């Protein structure tokens, strides 16, 4: 995937918009995983795929540095 607004990809950028701290990054990942379980199979598969594309390690590094 190509870079998006200075972030590794669009999914990572979208998550970053909703995070202000390292705890927010962890909460976002857990929230997305928890709602995936309640979705119909196709929607669940798409969300799980999108979650896997997010560069969580990159987000953790960025927000850890800001702490």
Image (spheres, rainbow, N blue to C red):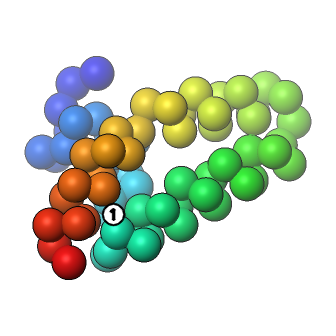
Q: In the shown orientation, is residue 8 left or right of residue 16?
A: left
| Pointer 1 local density, CA inside 10 Å: few below 14, some 14–19, many at least 20 | few
Residue 21: quadrant of the picture: bottom left
* Callout 1: SS: helix
Q: Residue at x 20, y 78 (%)?
A: 67
Question: Which quadrant: the N terminus?
Answer: top left
Q: Nearer the viewer, residue 60 or 20?
A: 60
Residue at image mark 1: 17
Q: Residue at x 48, y 62 (%)?
A: 26
Q: Is residue 26 above or below residue 11?
A: below
Q: In the shown orientation, is residue 45 left or right of residue 20?
A: right
x, y percentage for residue 65? 14, 67
Q: Is residue 27 above or below residue 36?
A: below
x, y percentage for residue 38? 86, 48
Q: Residue at x 25, y 46 (%)?
A: 58
Residue 54: quadrant of the picture: top left
Residue 55: quadrant of the picture: top left
**Label total for image:** 1
Q: Residue at x 18, y 32 (%)?
A: 3
Q: In the shown orientation, is residue 49 left or right of residue 56?
A: right
């Amino acid at each position: 995937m190509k870079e998006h607004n200075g972030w590794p990809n669009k999914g990572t950028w979208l998550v970053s918009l909703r995070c202000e701290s390292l705890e927010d990054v962890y909460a976002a990942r857990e929230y997305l995983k928890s709602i995936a379980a309640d979705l119909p199979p196709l929607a669940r598969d798409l969300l799980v795929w999108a979650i896997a594309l997010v560069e969580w390690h990159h987000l953790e590094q960025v927000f850890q540095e800001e702490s």
